[in-house]
Image (cartoon, rainbow, N blue to C red):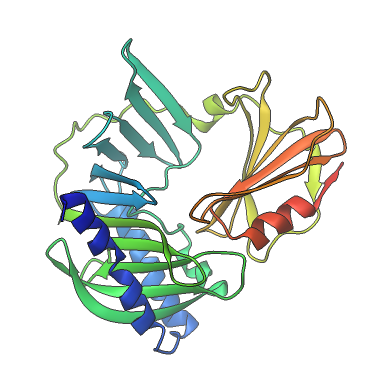
């Protein structure tokens, strides 16, 4: 068996663990909130350094990560260890990806800094409104003891998660997004990690562009959303340039804190045919339709009912 095949087999192991975890009763909301908040805080506030594997469908990547933890220099630096070299700097809700392109370094800006193991929102306790939390068995990941937790959606508007939290620090060591059948859609796992490690990267903070620089102006509110799936709120509303688009488009992001759905608005230069799309593995769903004089595309790593609810609830202002 090849090394890649062995990793894919190891990453799939939580499916069995998730099934056993479901046999237990959900934790009371207060206890579940405490578990989730500890995991979220550890991923942001602890200094750690390690290597993790990311797997989505047929794509597998290995990344090195350094997290500085709390303080004025708080930031994460992720570096690809296979394929094309790429560095991503994440700090205070924004990130900058740097990719050599033969003539220099191409930068790719994003309005999000979420990454493994920082997957849970700042207010992780609020997730208990939309997910039931169950404790699973103890396990070992990257040589460290950890406890499995299962986050099961209480409705059809979000995917589930399985995470293994380190026994002392509660840092997530392994995580998997699963569909309603428990099938893995997205997986992460540390192969090695030093918690409390002093980062070996430069102590100088990098000059990361601010959100204001990434989005030159706010949205014009061309359309309105009449109803949203329970728990979703708009967390981003900007104008930005996208590839193969002559003009800026409005980009809104809706989230329940764990699942994110993007909405792109641009002028309809011609009649727009309604298009529904789904990725091969069923993780990504898309719906494009015309709303008045606008073309709107709703896209997210979310179940179809969530994407459909937002897309069909739009109206021109």
Apparent side of residue 221 relative to residue 192 in the rendered image (left or right): right
In this rendering, is residue 182 above or below 312?
Answer: below
- Residue 127, percent from left and from top: 51, 68
Residue 254 in sight: yes
Closer to the camera, 91 or 131? Answer: 131
> Residue 105's quadrant in the figure?
top left
Closer to the camera, 168 or 13? Answer: 13
- Residue 290, percent from left and from top: 81, 39
- Residue 186, percent from left and from top: 40, 56
Q: Identify which residue is drawn at 37% across, 48% down.
A: 115
Q: Quadrant of the C terminus?
A: top right
Q: Residue furthest top?
A: 103
Q: Residue furthest front?
A: 1
Q: Identify which residue is drawn at 20% across, 70% down.
A: 168
Q: Tell how many labels.
A: 0
Closer to the camera, 255 or 16? Answer: 16
Residue 195 in sight: no
Q: Identify which residue is drawn at 20% across, 74% down.
A: 139
> Residue 238's quadrant in the figure?
top right
Q: Quadrant of the N terminus?
A: bottom left
Q: Identify which residue is drawn at 50% across, 59% down.
A: 258
């Amino acid at each position: 068996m090849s090394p890649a095949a062995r990793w894919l087999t190891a990453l799939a192991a939580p499916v069995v663990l998730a099934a056993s975890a479901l046999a237990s009763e959900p934790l009371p909301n207060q206890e579940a909130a405490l578990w989730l908040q500890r995991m979220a805080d550890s991923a942001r506030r602890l200094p750690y350094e390690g290597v993790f594997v990311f797997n989505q469908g047929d794509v597998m990547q290995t990344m090195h990560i350094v997290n500085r933890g709390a303080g004025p220099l708080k930031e994460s630096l992720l570096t690809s260890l296979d394929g094309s070299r790429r560095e991503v700097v994440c700090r205070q809700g924004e990130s900058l990806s740097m990719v050599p392109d033969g003539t220099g370094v191409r930068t790719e800006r994003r309005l999000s800094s979420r990454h493994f193991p920082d997957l849970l929102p700042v207010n992780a306790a609020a997730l208990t409104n939309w997910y039931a939390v169950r404790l699973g068995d103890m396990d070992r990941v990257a040589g460290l003891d950890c406890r499995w937790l299962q986050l099961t959606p209480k409705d059809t508007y979000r995917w589930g998660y399985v995470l293994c939290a380190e026994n002392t620090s509660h840092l997530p060591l392994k995580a998997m997004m699963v569909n309603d059948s428990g099938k893995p859609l997205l997986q992460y796992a540390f192969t090695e990690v030093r918690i409390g490690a002093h980062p070996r990267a430069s102590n100088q903070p990098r000059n990361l562009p601010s959100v204001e620089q990434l989005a030159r102006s706010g949205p014009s509110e061309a359309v309105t959303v009449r109803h949203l799936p329970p728990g979703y709120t708009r967390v981003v509303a900007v104008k930005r340039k996208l590839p193969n688009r002559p003009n800026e488009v409005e980009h809104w992001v809706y989230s329940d804190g764990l699942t994110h759905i993007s909405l792109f608005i641009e002028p309809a230069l011609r009649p727009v045919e309604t298009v529904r799309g789904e990725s091969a593995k069923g993780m990504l769903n898309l719906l494009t339709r015309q709303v008045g004089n606008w073309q709107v595309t709703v896209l997210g790593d979310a179940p179809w009912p969530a994407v459909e609810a937002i897309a069909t609830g739009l109206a021109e202002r």
